[in-house]
């Protein structure tokens, strides 16, 4: 046998690599997870996720059923979880994933998130107003945000909220910052990332990124009985499809993309596109860029990157599920919309912040639909797991972090494009260069906040979910850092907060 180590030496080194990695994670102090206190604050659990459980006519959860859910989550006993009373045929989405262990990266219970906005806060009010505005502007082409009356109104009103935390320009929300994220270069260029426009090299074929969408105006759950049926776990009505595949041109198209995409599809597509850009698109840290005799493949080549993009995706979901079910149990925007409706129709009295109750967008929703419920892009509304953090955001944050570690963030993407008005073609974009790093940040933002456009998430779900996925991926990259034979200086990348790190 050739090689620097004997079989016995190799076994010993592998053992110590695993042991040292385990010790590194073991030596961290346990994290003290903090929620926003709403579950203790409100006896009727009006601020918590209760979808699929039985509810009264106000959409308030049966307290015995909620107590059963809490008991089951506390014990983790599969039999307790099977005993939770359900309101209909729809099931909870995999709460036992919150207890899973994995053998790489940080344990999912050792990931950290700040508490989300409280139910009665001005912050929550601003996030709900933004979700209402996203619903009303779903059919506005992204390239028309500067001129469309609705998006101009949305930017103006969100600027007046005292605690709106989306990106601003000189202290105000503008049509150029509307519904975007503040990650580096996210505000540059078209609303949609180049990685959701460019053709995907897929083995011996090429996949154009034209996707199934739904017809304009196809909104759901604006009828109160329909809304209540869905909260109780009832069956939804059928969606209204658009039979013509289109490039993503508006919020409705984006909402549909993040409705039926598989877990790491966006990161996988981006990886395949990046792999086709050549060696100049690789990270300067790639050890094979300076080799005269070798090229990367199983390590520092396509199979390596593709493997890590998929590997971090489940780990990111594990971390998200822990926080969703065992820490925060935050209600979904559609549930909050029911609280708004019942409060404003004098059916109940809830501590909703006055900035939302006095907003323009509330009146516009009522004038269009006859209720104050949040118009949903999906017939079934949100998934059946709590809101915070967003699973899509965690997936996107993790996958994008891996891609930033392997590719040159400063590389300018050739021939940038945007979608035509009808979404049937791509047109050139020429207002400035777009980089890999900026468009990867934008991809994470599109995937995370695209779920807000559907009505199923809040802004803070997406922003914190992206950062959670990033933290998960960094720990995985750190675990693998010492396993390579190459002379390697480490993974260098720019975090979503703009800080540059080397792992």
Image: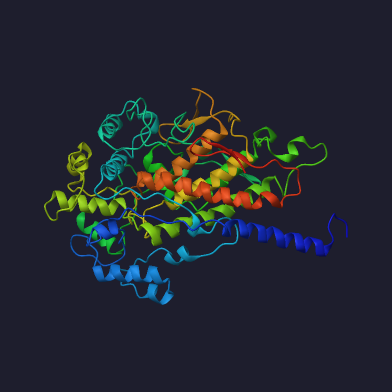
Look at the image and tell me whether residue 346 can be seen.
Answer: yes
Q: Which residue of the protein is positioned furthest toward the top in this rendering?
A: 431
Q: Is residue 193 left or right of residue 475?
A: left
Q: Residue at left 20%, top 46%? A: 369
Against 461, is 141 above or below?
A: above
Q: Which residue of the protein is positioned furthest toward the right in this rendering?
A: 1
Front residue (pair 150, 55)? 55
Q: Residue at left 40%, top 36%? A: 180
Front residue (pair 314, 219)? 314
Q: Residue at left 32%, top 47%? A: 117
Look at the image and tell me whether residue 213 can be seen.
Answer: no
Against 479, is 56 above or below?
A: below
Against 37, is 364 above or below?
A: above
Q: Position of residue 206 (x, y in %)?
A: 60, 43
> In the rendered image, which quarter contains the C terminus?
top right
Q: Position of residue 38 (x, y in %)?
A: 28, 56
Q: Residue at left 41%, top 77%? A: 79
Q: Is residue 86 left or right of residue 265?
A: left
Q: Is residue 186 left or right of residue 65?
A: right
> In the rendered image, which quarter contains the N terminus?
bottom right
Q: Is residue 261 left or right of residue 26?
A: left
Front residue (pair 393, 140)? 393
Q: Position of residue 232 (x, y in %)?
A: 27, 64
């Amino acid at each position: 046998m050739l090689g620097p180590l004997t079989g016995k030496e190799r076994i010993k080194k592998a053992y110590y690599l695993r042991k040292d990695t385990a010790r590194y994670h073991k030596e961290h102090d346990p994290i003290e997870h903090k929620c926003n206190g709403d579950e203790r604050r409100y006896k009727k659990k009006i601020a918590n996720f209760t979808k699929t459980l039985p509810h009264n006519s106000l959409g308030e959860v049966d307290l015995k059923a909620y107590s059963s859910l809490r008991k089951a989550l506390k014990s983790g006993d599969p039999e307790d979880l099977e005993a939770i009373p359900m309101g209909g045929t729809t099931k909870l989405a995999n709460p036992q994933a919150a207890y899973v262990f994995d053998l790489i990266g940080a344990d999912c219970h050792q990931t950290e998130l700040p508490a989300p906005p409280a139910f009665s806060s001005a912050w929550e009010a601003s996030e709900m107003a933004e979700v209402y505005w996203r619903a009303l502007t779903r059919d506005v082409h992204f390239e028309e945000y500067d001129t469309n009356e609705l998006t101009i109104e949305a930017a103006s009103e969100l600027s007046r909220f005292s605690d709106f935390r989306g990106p601003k320009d000189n202290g105000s929300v503008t049509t150029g910052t509307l519904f975007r994220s503040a990650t580096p270069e996210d505000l540059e260029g078209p609303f949609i990332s180049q990685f959701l426009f460019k053709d995907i090299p897929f083995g011996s074929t090429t996949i154009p990124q034209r996707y199934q969408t739904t017809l304009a105006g196809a909104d759901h759950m604006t009828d109160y009985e329909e809304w209540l049926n869905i909260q109780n776990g009832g069956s939804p009505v059928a969606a209204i499809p658009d039979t013509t595949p289109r490039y993503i041109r508006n919020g409705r198209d984006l909402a549909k993309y993040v409705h039926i995409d598989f877990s790491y599809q966006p990161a996988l597509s981006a990886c395949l596109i990046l792999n086709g850009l050549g060696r100049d698109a690789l990270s300067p840290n790639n050890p094979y860029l300076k080799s005269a005799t070798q090229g990367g493949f199983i390590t520092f080549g396509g199979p390596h990157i593709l493997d890590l993009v998929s590997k971090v995706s489940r780990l990111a979901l594990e971390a998200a599920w822990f926080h969703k079910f065992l820490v925060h149990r935050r209600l979904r925007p559609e549930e909050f919309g029911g609280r708004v409706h019942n409060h404003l129709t004098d059916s109940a009295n809830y501590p909703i912040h006055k900035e939302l109750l006095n907003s323009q967008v509330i009146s516009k929703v009522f004038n269009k639909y006859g209720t104050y419920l949040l118009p949903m892009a999906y017939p079934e509304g949100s998934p059946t797991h709590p809101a915070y953090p967003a699973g899509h955001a965690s997936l996107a944050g993790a996958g994008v972090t891996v891609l930033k570690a392997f590719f040159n963030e400063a590389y300018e993407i050739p021939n940038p494009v945007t979608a035509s008005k009808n979404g049937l073609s791509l047109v050139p974009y020429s207002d400035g260069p777009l980089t890999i790093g900026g468009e990867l940040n934008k991809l994470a933002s599109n995937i995370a906040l695209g779920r807000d456009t559907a009505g199923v998430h809040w802004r803070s779900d997406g922003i914190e979910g992206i950062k959670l996925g990033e933290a998960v991926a960094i720990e995985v990259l750190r675990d693998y850092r010492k396993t390579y034979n190459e002379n390697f200086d480490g993974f260098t990348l720019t975090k979503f907060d703009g800080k540059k790190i080397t792992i």
